Image (cartoon, rainbow, N blue to C red):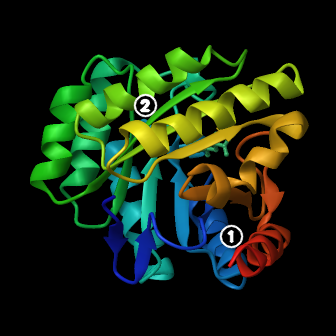
Amino acid sequence: MQVVSIRDVHIGEGIPKIIVPLMGKKEENLLLEIREILQTEPDIIEWRVDVLEEVENIAAVKQTLSAIRKELYPIPLLFTFRSHREGGNKIITDAYYKQLLEEVSQTNDVDLLDVELFSPHVNEIVETAKNNHVTIVMSNHDFEKTPAKEEIVWRLRKMQELGAHIPKIAVMPKTPEDVLTLLDATYTMHTLHADRPIITMSMASTGLISRIAGETFGSAATFGSGKEASAPGQIPVNELRNVLGILHKNMR
Ligand SMILES: O=C1C[C@@](O)(C(=O)O)C[C@@H](O)[C@@H]1O
């Protein structure tokens, strides 16, 4: 099993890593948000750039990115534009999605890049990111339902085939049984197919248990809320750290 290391954060070994989303609409809010979040000592910070008011202005995005990076360094930064069809905040064209991801890959300010599996330009974006030594977190989200186990495993395997360093999937449960499906798919992927870390979660209150159970079933990281949650079911980062710590300590 490969471990993905960014500076001294080692994803895929030990306690699952905590990723905290930044949800500010403007640069000044984002910088204040980072100061608050840093006090909670996250392992990784995710910038949800689809929330930024000026996201359609690529020069503004790069300038804000550079300011964010300075503020949070050396914490690894995950750059995410979540598309509207997968639960994000803004509708942009596929061409702009490609341009945005490729241009930020070339800045040296991004450690990890979220690339959606179903983007029509996924191969080109992966190639550019890899050429620039950016770690690829390939993702898929279903905010409506939980697909069948075979489908979840298929998507995660597809991400691995396409060159993701870290495949990731988030699904919505309607029942606790759906959460079992996600956990079962996670465990199967982790033990039988994956040669690298994966991240999975079942969302909302029914799925909450999946966000703390990664060490048991094989999800290498989990999203905890900082100032604002970026998806339903995220636990505040301090509480999340406590629970993960209790589980880790007593699993030895
Ligand atoms: O992919 C994910 C996972 C997520 O949707 C969650 O459910 O925690 C939150 C998003 O910000 C992130 O990009």
Amino acid carrying mark 1 in the image: Glu
Which residue occupies 78% across, 71% down? 247
* Quadrant that contains the C terminus: bottom right
Between the C-alphas of marks 1 and 2, the distance is 32 Å
Q: Reply above or below: 37 against 220.
A: below
Taking depth in this image into account, of 135 and 30 the one nearest to the observer is: 135
Amino acid carrying mark 2 in the image: Leu
Which residue occupies 39% across, 19% down? 118
* SS at badge 2: helix
Taking depth in this image into account, of 46 and 19 the one nearest to the observer is: 19
Residue denoted by label 2: 156
Query: Within the image, what quadrant is residue 122 found in?
Result: top left
Pointer 2 residue Cβ closer than 8 Å to ligand 1: no
Q: Position of residue 164 (x, y in %)?
A: 30, 42
Q: Is residue 194 left or right of residue 244?
A: left
Pointer 1 residue Cβ closer than 8 Å to ligand 1: no
Q: Is residue 23 visible?
A: no
Q: Reply above or below: 231 against 228.
A: above
Q: Are marks 1 and 2 in contact (CB under 8 Å)?
A: no
Task: Please report whichever mark, 1 or 2, sits nearer to the chain's N-terminal start.
Answer: 1
Which residue occupies 43% across, 31% down? 156
* Quadrant that contains the N terminus: bottom left
Q: Is residue 151 visible?
A: yes
Farthest residue to the left: give it: 131
Local crowd size for mark 1, using a 10 Å CA cut-off: few (<14), some (14–19), many (≥20): some
Residue denoted by label 1: 33
Taking depth in this image into account, of 2 and 93 the one nearest to the observer is: 2
Return the mark for residue 10.
Answer: none
Which residue occupies 69% across, 19% down? 146
Closer to us: mark 1 or mark 2? 2
* SS at badge 1: helix
Query: Within the image, what quadrant is residue 116 found in?
Result: top left
